[in-house]
Image: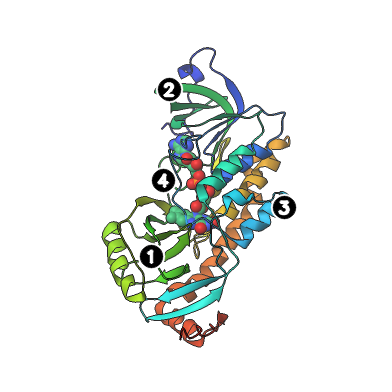
Amino acid sequence: MHHPSHPRPSALVPAGAPRYDIIIVGLGPAGATLARLLSPRLKVLAIDKKSGGAEGGFRKPCGGLLAPDAQKVLARFDLALPARVLVSPQIFAVKTIDADARRTRCYQRFYLNLDRHRFDQWLISLIPSRVEVRKDACLKSLVKTGAGFDVTWHQDGADFTASATHVVGADGASSAVRRALYGGRRGIRHYTAIQQWFHDEHAGPFYSCIFDSDTTDCYAWGLSKDRHFIFGGAFPPKHCRERFERLKERMKAFGFCFGAPLRTEACMVLRPSGLFDCRTGREGGFLLGEAAGFISPSSLEGISYAMGSALTLSKILNGNNRSPNRTYFLRTLPVRARLFLKNLKVPFMYFKPLRRLVMAVGVKSIRMADAPETR
Ligand SMILES: Cc1cc2nc3c(=O)[nH]c(=O)nc-3n(C[C@H](O)[C@H](O)[C@H](O)COP(=O)(O)OP(=O)(O)OC[C@H]3O[C@@H](n4cnc5c(N)ncnc54)[C@H](O)[C@@H]3O)c2cc1C
């Protein structure tokens, strides 16, 4: 893609190509929320490589847990979650496994267990019809011009081009918009998330969070969802598949059951570590949600940040702000500070001796009731 600091005239765009105020790339929680909140005065196009149907097409690999912070953002929007987005069962505790110390503790949690694909589709369904939504549309190129951006996407076997004053990259961890705006420099720590789906063969449903320094310095998870069991983890990219299989083997000793995988999914996941890891965009281009690096480095929770950053940007783009990039950068400072502070929590979760101590003491853990005798 063309670097935005060397603008080209808009000569590449065919005559008569449509012009928008804003083009949003990506309709995950970030892009769909922004598309819903933008003023009717603005002419908006939103493209996403996901297909329109409930099944098929691109699906975001995700644990599908809606954390209290994300629930709070939905509450701010006065939105209530339709039951069809929830899965069975809802789980009230996380079983935390320190595989290094071979210790397990349970902690109370207030997550909602969701079907992530249905959640995304529900957010898209809330976008008003005045926004032009193109599904199955994959960004092909983004070029900075004197008057904004030329955006080309591939859809139904053909290429389409439009121009816009602003472009918003809400296209997730491996954001092509971020690469285009910053000349290919990712500049942020990243992992490969691998997740497999199985028929759930465990005696009862559960949610588990696994720390195993042999395979990753991040974490892994196991989760029951609609009679399926999802097992996934975030691994350093080098030898990630081998690390994943090794962890699966290790988890059998903790009672995990894996039959033949029904589905394997993988994607990049970002893990910001410094105050300046996150990028908010430049020169009329903006980054939202995980494309900006807004994701918790301790828990990898990202839905609340995606929707929250969309709310912040919508207020700026809806007003007549003279320096929207600068304002967005300043208004997201608290988020960046919060993410940075979350890094202070990281040693207690990821540094072996500290975690061992925390789990041995059992701070905030739940004392489990004994199971009733069966005879
Ligand atoms: C395995 C895994 C498990 C996770 N579990 C949780 C969890 O349980 N709870 C939680 O809160 N967070 C979780 N996260 C983090 C969370 O999924 C992300 O932070 C969140 O989805 C970010 O939202 P977003 O809208 O910024 O980006 P995304 O949800 O990634 O959405 C990006 C959108 O852009 C589209 N797109 C991408 N590239 C293009 C392109 N070139 N052209 C057109 N469209 C494009 C995609 O189709 C997608 O719809 C998890 C992440 C991973 C990887």
What amino acid is labelled 4 in the image?
A: Arg
**Residue 123, x across and y down, in percent:** 60, 43
**Residue 89, x across and y down, in percent:** 54, 62
Is tag 3's residue or tag 2's residue first in the polypeptide sequence? Answer: 3
Of discs 1 and 4, which sits in the foreground?
1
Q: CA distance from mark 1 to mark 4?
A: 44 Å
- Name the residue rendered at 56%, 47% in the picture: 119
Which label is found at residue 126? none
For label 3, the crowd category at 10 Å Cα-Cα, with few meaning under 14, some 14 to 19 and many 20 or more, is few
Is tag 2's residue or tag 1's residue first in the polypeptide sequence? Answer: 2
In the depicted structure, whether residue 105 falls above or below residue 324: below
Q: CA distance from mark 2 to mark 4?
A: 26 Å
Which part of the image, by quadrant, shows the N terminus? Answer: top left
Is tag 3's residue or tag 4's residue first in the polypeptide sequence? Answer: 3
Residue 288 visible at all:
no
What amino acid is labelled 1 in the image?
A: Glu
Residue identifier under label 3: 76
What amino acid is labelled 3 in the image?
A: Arg
Residue identifier under label 2: 159
**Residue 205, x across and y down, in percent:** 47, 67
Q: Secondary structure at mark 1?
A: loop
Of discs 3 and 1, which sits in the foreground?
1
What amino acid is labelled 2 in the image?
A: Asp
Residue identifier under label 1: 201
- Name the residue rendered at 50%, 20% in the picture: 10
Q: CA distance from mark 2 to mark 1?
A: 46 Å
For label 2, the crowd category at 10 Å Cα-Cα, with few meaning under 14, some 14 to 19 and many 20 or more, is few
